[in-house]
Amino acid sequence: MANYIHVPPGSPEVPKLDVTVQDQEEQRCRDGALSLLRHLRPHWDPREVTLQLFTDGITNKLIACYVGDTMEDVVLVRIYGNKTELLVDRDEEVKSFRVLQAHGCAPQLYCTFNNGLCYEFIQGEALDPQHVCNPAIFRLIARQLAKIHAIHAHNGWIPKSNLWLKMGKYFSLIPTGFADEDINKRFLSDVPSPQLLQEEMTWMKEILSSLGSPVVLCHNDLLCKNIIYNEKQGEVQFIDYEYSGYNYLAYDIGNHFNEFAGVSDVDYSLYPDRELQGQWLRSYLEAYKEYKGFGSEVTEKEVETLFIQVNQFALASHFFWGLWALIQAKYSTIEFDFLGYAIVRFNQYFKMKPEVTALKMPE
């Protein structure tokens, strides 16, 4: 969802290494990672390098590489998932990473390689749904997201959102069926028809585009595990910028609120209620105004307006990840019920649509 992301002048160049890391066999994976480390950490003894696989991701494989026991210096190696180039513009991802790094909102990007990238490990805890509803933590998240949203576009250029273009592209890539009979039966019975999906996309584009939500630099994938909380320092950082780019501000927040429900075991009863959203959005608006130099006074009307925009854009988030999951169901080699996830997201879209479209903007 990027639209002309401009890397600030003076940003360090990111080396591209001609290395491919095989992720199917442990030894070949280790060999590939060590090839990268010969460039990035030439002083490390390869025999002493520990590789630790993180298992939370459902798009890519993530491996931590370090020596010793303290994990003080850790190189993260992220290996792109199968066919994810259909879903992610890797050049734009690197640009987003570099822009966020230049503004102190991302770790250091060490290099890219043929099928992935390496970056600095952020100390802290990847969050779960029970954390993101904690006021002490969600206020930090709101402020950090506001900081990213307040990053100025290059030379006063007015960015446009690529949401509808990207959604259209995903729609063109969704499978028409599956070879496995049971999976195909489930697909045909539980996933909305292409005609209905097309109609909903047309409706969303017309209605949501007219809500007046500013287009800003967004993370676009702020699920709980992409938020790292450092309790000692009292701060949060966001990771994984694959979907980052210019988009509607309200989409980014609505998408995050949807993620309160979790990923593996989705529970929409955890979606934040009006009171929590009100507190969250007020913290966000105060920070956003501060970062933009508008003072920090926030009115009830501003909170209410953003509340409506966010909850209506949350529909687009359900739809986007529903399409995404259908494509993943066809191509991904990661063990996850992508088809089931798509069905859950589309069901929630249709469940929430009447409720959130009934919300009226304050006078």
Image: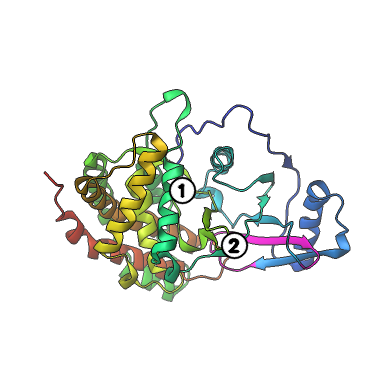
Residue 246 at x, y percent in the picture: 42, 39
Residue 219 image label: 1
Quadrant of the image containing the C terminus: top left
Q: Few, some or many C-alpha atoms within 10 Å of disc 1 (few <14, some 14-19, many ≥20)?
A: many
Which of 143/113 is in front? 143
Amino acid type shown at disc 1 = His
Q: Is residue 213 left or right of residue 63?
A: left
Location of residue 34 with respect to 202 vertically, above or below: below
Identified at 34% across, 56% down, the residue is 280
Magenta-highlighted residues: 54-69
Query: Which badge, 2 or 1, comes first in the chain's sequence?
Result: 2
Q: Is residue 319 visible?
A: no
Residue 59 at x, y percent in the picture: 54, 59
Cα separation, mark 2 vs mark 1, equals 19 Å
Q: Is residue 222 magenta?
A: no
Location of residue 130 with respect to 327 vertically, above or below: below
Amino acid type shown at disc 2 = Gly
Residue 293 at x, y percent in the picture: 38, 34
Q: Is residue 264 left or right of residue 332?
A: left
The residue sitting at the bottom extreme is 182
Which of 110/146 is in front? 146
Identified at 48% across, 48% down, the residue is 243
Identified at 25% across, 49% down, the residue is 303
In the structure shown, which secondary structural element does the residue marked by tag 1 occupy? Answer: loop
Residue identified by numbered label 2:
124
The residue sitting at the top extreme is 155
Q: Is residue 311 visible?
A: yes
The picture quadrant where one finds residue 3 is: top left
Residue 229 image label: none
Identified at 78% across, 68% down, the residue is 69
In the structure shown, which secondary structural element does the residue marked by tag 2 occupy? Answer: loop
